[in-house]
Image (cartoon, rainbow, N blue to C red):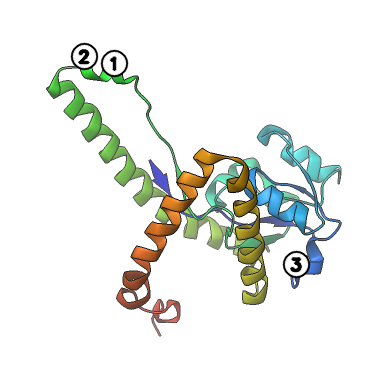
Amino acid sequence: SIIGPEGAGWFAQPIEGMDDFDGLKIRFAGIGGKVLEKLGASVTMVPGGEIYQALERKTIDATEFSQPAIDKMLGLDQIIKNYIMPGWHQTLTTSHLLVNKDTWDKLEPQTRALIEMGCESATLKGFAESEWAQPTALRDYEKEGVTAQTLPEPVLRELQKVTNEVLDEIAAKDEMFKRVLTSQREFMEHHSIWHSKGYLPRDFYQYD
């Protein structure tokens, strides 16, 4: 399955510049956490079920978790009223069904086709439902007094720069990571002509 971008997280204070990450105590996962560490943040991994309490007790200043609708299930908007977007660290989420190849090869073609069709259907349905749930959650947040802040472009550009530095550092130590990263960057380069020319600019995505 595939769902769209996450939020950048819930922060006690708005993020206006890169210095705002320095000294921040934040729950952040994965490579994004390594990026924030480079910027001076104190990064920790709090289990999802303990994030609410950690924010309530102020053991952390900020957290990321998932998309707006999923974060709402955790009640994070009850503790912090400043939601930062977009999720620069995770522009989409994929879930996978892994099947042992020997087992897969033993299945009847009809059974394999049913599994593939089921996965394709779940992917399409999950993405469609998610794309409705996120704006609905954001509008609910607005009614509750939550500010959904968009990160300034200079901050996003700097995060992009530091992220690429971190990716290159990991790739230098991990051959498999390097192969995957190279493949992803090649796809981005190939797709860029369509992305830049085929889609309207974002400010067209409105009706007056």
Alpha carbons under labels 1 and 2: distance apart: 6 Å
Q: Amino acid at mark 2?
A: Lys
Q: Quadrant of the C terminus?
A: bottom left
| Disc 1 packing (10 Å; few <14; some 14–19; many ≥20) | few
Q: Is residue 144 visible?
A: no
Residue 178 horizontal side relative to residue 12, left or right: left
Q: Is residue 81 shown above or below 206?
A: above
> Circle 2 is placed at which residue position?
106
Residue at (63%, 43%) from the top-left corner?
A: 30
Quarter of the view holding residue 96: top left
Say which label, 3 or 2, has the lower sequence index: 3
What amino acid type is highlighted by mark number 3?
A: Pro
Q: Nearer the viewer, residue 182 or 92?
A: 182
Q: Is residue 7 above or below residue 176?
A: below
Q: Amino acid at mark 1?
A: Asp
21 relative to 2 in the view: left or right: right
Residue at mark 1: 102
Relative depth, front residue between 119 and 140: 119
The x and y percentages for residue 168 are 60, 53
- Where is residue 57? Give x, y as percent: 86, 42
Q: Nearer the viewer, residue 204 or 171?
A: 171
Q: Secondary structure at mark 3?
A: loop
Residue 175 as seen in the image, left or right of residue 102: right
Residue at x 46% of width, y 45% of height: 179
- Which mark's residue is nearer the viewer, 3 or 1? 1
Provide the secondary structure element on which disc 2 rests.
Answer: helix
The residue carrying mark 3 is: 14
x%, y% of residue 191?
Answer: 34, 64
Number of disc labels: 3
